[in-house]
Amino acid sequence: MTIKAIKEKYDGVYGNGEKTMFKVFDYGGEIGKAVIVATKHFAYGNTVWQAVRVSDGAELIKEGRCRPCDSMMDAIDVAEEMMEA
């Protein structure tokens, strides 16, 4: 799955009309390159919702889980923790 296809698929899926943001990061190893999907709410801040592996389009975070993050750089670490849990 391409990065563009992932962005098109997940744009507007999470949150309630909040801005969808994407961060591409290469975790290496088994995970490889992934696209982190987060939303930005004007009152609540940023929330990480999903990480999608670019090579096969697999969702790496269990459905229904989300966590706040301070910034999109912080989202890299938050998403990795969510994948392991």
Image (cartoon, rainbow, N blue to C red):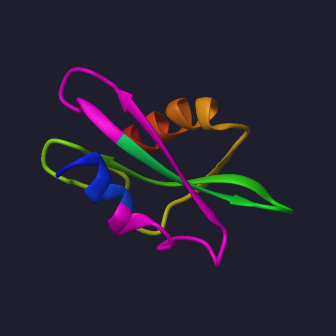
- Residue 26 % position (x, y): 32, 25
Question: At x 67% / y 69%, what residue is drawn?
Answer: 18
Q: Is residue 10 left or right of residue 30?
A: right
Q: Residue 20 falls in which quadrant of the image? A: bottom right
How many numbered tags mark residues here? Answer: 0
Which residue of the protein is positioned furthest toward the bottom in this rendering? 16
Residue nearest the viewer, comparing 26 with 19: 19
- Residue 8 in picture, x, y percent from top left: 36, 64
**Residue 69: % across, % down:** 68, 43
Can you name the residue that lies furthest to the right here? 43
- Apparent side of residue 53 relative to residue 20 in the rendered image (left or right): left
Q: Is residue 62 visible?
A: no
Question: Looking at the image, which residue sits at the far top?
Answer: 28
Q: Is residue 66 magenta?
A: no
The quarter in which the C terminus is drawn is: top left
Q: Please report the bounds of the magenta region as a residue range.
A: 8-34
- Residue depicted at 23% across the width and 29% down the height: 32
Q: Is residue 17 left or right of residue 76?
A: right
Q: Is residue 12 above or below residue 21?
A: below
Residue closer to the observer: 75 or 40: 40
Q: Position of residue 19 (x, y in %)?
A: 64, 63
